[in-house]
Image: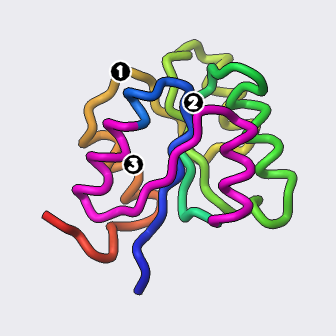
């Protein structure tokens, strides 16, 4: 089996690095993008098993990125978890209506995110603990 791939799309480089590092320690392969446009490009090329997507980014925001990913045949089936500081009910609803399977509000504990990932795509195939 190949490693499960997670694409992290967030404009904050430090958060991308930390999430990528922690998810790799748990046995996932990670890909990162700093913009929605780059995230769409990588998703088309790499076909990740899951996308972690920030809502607030320069250029196209996470909600529009999610809508575009869901509108394209080659990326429509990839589950998306919105991971963002936008916590108002209208934001959560917009995230889910744009196609996300789940919505997590920052700040969060890594274990909560890990549990959400496992709930959506299952445990990593080859943990490296």
Q: CA distance from mark 3 to mark 2?
A: 15 Å
Residue at 38 percent of width and 27 percent of height: 14
The x and y percentages for residue 126 are 27, 75
Q: Secondary structure at mark 3?
A: helix
Quarter of the image that includes the N terminus? bottom left
The x and y percentages for residue 45 are 70, 64
Would you say residue 21 sits in the magenta stretch?
Answer: yes
- Vertical side of 66 occupied by 28: above or below: below
Q: Residues within 10 Å of mark 1 (few under 14, many from 20)?
A: few
Identify the residue position indicated by label 3 in the image: 116
- Vertical side of 102 occupied by 11: above or below: above
Q: Residue furthest left?
A: 129
Identify the residue position indicated by label 1 in the image: 107
Quarter of the image that includes the C terminus? bottom left
Q: Is residue 111 left or right of residue 62?
A: left
- Vertical side of 9 occupied by 123: above or below: below
Q: Are marks 3 and 2 in contact (CB under 8 Å)?
A: no
Quarter occupied by residue 91: top right
Residue at 37 percent of width and 59 percent of height: 118
The x and y percentages for residue 61 are 72, 25
Residue at 30 percent of width and 40 percent of height: 112
Q: CA distance from mark 1 to mark 3?
A: 14 Å
77 or 37: nearer the viewer: 37
| Earlier residue among tags 1 and 3 | 1
Identify the residue position indicated by label 2 in the image: 54
């Amino acid at each position: 089996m190949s490693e499960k791939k997670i694409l992290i799309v967030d404009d904050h480089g430090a958060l991308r690095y930390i999430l990528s590092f922690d998810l790799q320690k748990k046995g996932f392969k990670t890909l990162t993008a700093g913009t929605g446009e780059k995230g769409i490009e990588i998703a088309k090329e790499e076909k990740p098993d899951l996308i972690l997507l920030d809502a607030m980014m320069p250029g196209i925001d996470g909600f529009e990125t999610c809508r575009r990913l869901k509108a394209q045949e080659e990326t429509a089936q990839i589950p998306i978890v919105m991971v963002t500081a936008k916590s108002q009910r209208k934001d959560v609803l917009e995230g889910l209506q744009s196609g996300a399977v789940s919505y997590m509000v920052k700040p969060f504990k890594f274990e909560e995110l890990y549990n959400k990932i496992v709930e959506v795509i299952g445990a990593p195939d080859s943990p490296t603990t």
